[in-house]
Amino acid sequence: MDEKREIRVDVPVLARVEGEGALDLLIRDGEISELRLRIFEPPRFFEKFLEGRSYTEVPDIVARICGICPVAYQMSSVHAFESIFDADPGPWVREMRRLLYCGEWIESHSLHIHLLALPDFLGYPDAPSVARDHPAAVQRGLALQGLGNDLIRMLGGRSVHPVGVKVGGFWHAPSSGQAAAMLERLRAALPEAAELVHFVAGVTVPDDPQEFVSVALRHPDEYGMNEGGLVTSDGLEIGINEYEKYFAESHAPHSTALHSHYFPAGDAPHGAGRPYLVGPLARLNLNVDRLPAGVRENAEAAGLRFPSANMFHSMAARAVETHYAIVEAIRILESYAPSESPAVTISPRPGVGFGCTEAPRGILWHRYEADHEGRVVTARIVPPTSQNQPRIEEDLRRSLDAFGLDHDEEALRLRAETVIRNYDPCISCATHFLRLQLQRD
């Protein structure tokens, strides 16, 4: 690039992402001088209008934060309140919650792989164009997404913003017939999920290794999903109640969404913070040894190796997790029996509680303070996309440099959009109210 050449690439509205955002990129004298991922959706005040609400209302309210991953918001919230009330729903509820989460991973990952990411890597403008040349692949993706939605509906009453979850368990238990029918469908889909891993592994993606810190839940006995402690790829192991000591959000002037950073010394928010990665690639990087043998062997047979330092392997990680979620759902339903008591009795008491589960896009951390009646005094919700936003901006700089800044504006725009969509950002989830400090003379 000529030394005095200046090119400005504006992506005013990002296509194929949930929510509205934009990217500003200024290249001056052969270097990126400005790069801003702007989120301009207005705050939605979920944390604020939870205040004063009963714990019984919270799971259904937070489910409205996202239509793609409502289960994650419900699970993190019920765990937090149960920790305040010292409630143990028992093994049946625990397994059913894991089953419900499997449905969300299946539908969300299938949607992203087939409708949002594949067009980028196969060189098409959109999913209908992919379907013209790869109809079987897209049909498989839509079928898997529908299966995940139906699994959510079985336990949640409906697939979008489900209402079957409550603090203490579920409002109802699926019948033996419903469970048997779902088990049959999952078994029929298992070969398709295994083949999906091979199909995605065969898609050419940029070879773009980077250094980054992965953060995820880790459980001693199973693949991290609904329970566990927090671990990082640089050796940190903490309980979810210690999250605020090592992770902190801050306001970026160009965005209505907060940006999260990791503070390895445990001095958040006062020390030196750094970007970090949450989501399917981070989970596999930290938990590949927790996959069932068949899932791990299928991924290896497809040529996939984790841990991976290539962010573009996120799509493959989603495919592996889709396969895993179907295997796990089959395991749970093979021993299913309806419960006459799908929820335990809750006795509210005051206190502070924490919940952290793995949404499809990464860890979703909740903190609630409740009064003696179980009403919310304060609420804090940290979604995956706000945690990934500094990492996305760092990735954009590195990936565009590696791609070559001398490409024309259209090529740079496509590469930038590909990087952003690779994270499957849920922009609406990432916008919440900022603390305002106003000084008047």
Image: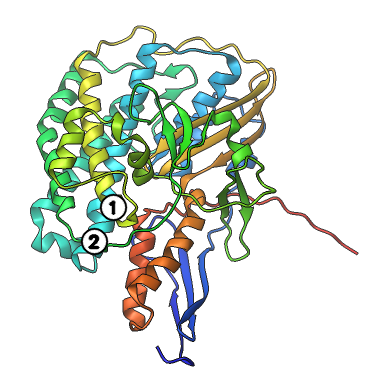
Element class at badge 2: loop
Left or right for 78, reference 301 = right
Q: Within 10 angstroms of label 1, few (less than 14), some, or many (20 or more) residues? A: many
Kind of residue sitting beneath label 1: His
Task: Say if mark 2 contacts mark 1, CB within 8 Å.
Answer: yes
Residue that carries the numbered disc 2 in the rendered image: 205
**In this view, 274 is above or below 363:** below
Residue tagged by mark 1? Answer: 313
Q: Residue at x 44, y 49 (%)?
A: 277
Task: Name above or below for residue 59 compared with residue 131.
Answer: above
Quarter of the image where one finds residue 293: top left
Q: Position of residue 384 (x, y in %)?
A: 47, 45
Give the camera-side residue of 290 and 375.
Answer: 290
**Residue for point 33% across, 25% down:** 222
Can the viewer see residue 20?
Answer: no
Residue at 24 percent across and 69 percent down: it is 125
- Amino acid identity at mark 2: Val
